Amino acid sequence: MKPIPQRALENVKSVMLTLLVVMSISLSVIEWNGTPGEVSVGSSHFFSSPLYGHERLMTDFINPNAIWIWTKGNELFRLGGKTATAKQILSQLQSAQIHTQGFVHNSPVTLPPAHGAYLALDYGTRLSDGSIWSYALPIANKTEHLSAQGGSLYLVQGPKSNVWSLEFQTAQGIYQMQLSHVSSNLKDALIPNNQSVPYAQLPFENQVFNLPYDAVSMLTQTWILASPLPIPIINSFFRDPSLVQTVQMSRNETAYTDGTHTVQLTRHSMGFKLSYNAPEVLLKHYHVSVREALSAAIPFVDSHGGFVGQVVLQQVNTTSGTGNVQLQFGDELNGWPVFSQLNQIQLDLINGSVTKMQRLLPYLQSEVAQERVTILSGAKLLQIIKSMHVQGVQSIMLGYGSTLQTLNEVQLVPVYQVVANNRVIYLDAQTGQPFQGMGM
């Protein structure tokens, strides 16, 4: 056997040494970023990223935005949809049975009810196609062919404490369910407690707005802003991260693509913003229900970073006659919506699959300071809006805005969100001055 030349032997050693170094680096990267595990999401396979948030279930998102209490004394109060009292109200309906149901004909029933006390469960756009009745209100699971226009379900007490009427508006008219065997404790919900915020129905520009009755106190909070490593989350969007090409689009924007899926990472005032895009093939006359969209969206987010904060489903937008559904998740604080991109996630689904996802990667990690402040009443706010000559007001909502205090601290302050002529204006809820927040 002819001996191997010394030069060739050295070359072989060099190649083997190089391979060992590459393998060592690869194992180190995997160990640092977390070993990806393949998961099935819809019809596509991705690598799951290390969660910096937490996994959620469908039932976590089917809560009312708020519950409105109209008392026998003609007073209006607001409850946050996730307050302890709101949860009690929903649980006290679990034992209810439907005695009769159907459309109201030749009856003076109006919505909201014109007389007497009632509870109004505000579900926003979640019941736009009726597909999640079984999650929102299990007793009404046989009404999935009906959509609640306006998003409100009205509960009116009958002649007995355990008899109530559930009423809501549909395209065909008012639908009414006569409920029996309702918990007798539900009547106590018509009596405001310390979680109930006094509101008033105030007229403005030929409309009526629900606004705080007097000077309400709210918390101003300071939070630590945490930023996760973006690369593990980016890798989770690709079947084989080793095939991903990096393209520097600009100084503040980098794109990652495998030729099919693309993730863009953009530098934001508060950190990195991630935008995911997949191929879109829109099929005509392909219907996707809200329930089907949520069933695909929730595990998708769980597998690509997870949810952070007290995120709720804020908005559902559907395009009639197509399989296009847009879902917007956002944070809540003490029962009030947070008007900020922090902890906000937006997804677009076509034909039941996620084709777009946007989220700001920094998130509110822990509270470090708080201060109780007094905000303007609704009547005072309307005077300020009128003095600003704002016209075409469509909605007014109280919540929180965000402003950057230091590089890693964010302050959440009470603000009024005013939508006028499809333009959004934020006003400081303490002073009424325009609020210029960060990440809004």
Image (cartoon, rainbow, N blue to C red):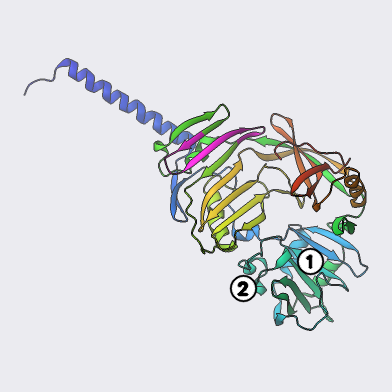
Residue 179 location (% of width, % of height): 74, 79
Residue 31 sits in quarter: top left
Q: Dot 1 corresponds to which residue?
A: 120
Q: Is residue 172 above or below residue 132?
A: below
Dot 1 lies on which element?
Answer: strand
Magenta stretch prevailing secondary structure: strand
**Gap between marks 1 and 2, in whole Å?**
21 Å
The residue under label 2 is which amino acid type?
His
Question: For residue 257: magenta?
Answer: yes
First to last magenta residue range:
255-272
Instruction: Point out the image quarter for the C terminus.
Output: top right
Q: In the drawing, does residue 47 fall left or right of residue 253?
A: left
What residue do we see at 45% from left, 38% from top? Answer: 257
Instruction: Point out the image quarter for the N terminus.
Output: top left
Q: Earlier in the sequence, mark 1 or mark 2?
A: 1
Q: 352 or 206, which is in the foreground? A: 206
Dot 2, how many residues are within 10 Å of its Cα: few (below 14), some (14-19), or many (20+)? few
Question: For residue 309: magenta?
Answer: no
Q: Dot 2 corresponds to which residue?
A: 145
Q: Is residue 330 above or below residue 138?
A: above
Dot 2 lies on which element?
Answer: loop
What residue do we see at 76% from left, 45% from top? Answer: 424
What residue do we see at 77% from left, 77% from top? Answer: 165
Residue 122 seen in this snapshot: yes
Q: 379 or 22, which is in the foreground? A: 379
Which mark, by number, is residue 409? Answer: none
The residue under label 1 is which amino acid type?
Ala
Q: State the count of labels.
A: 2
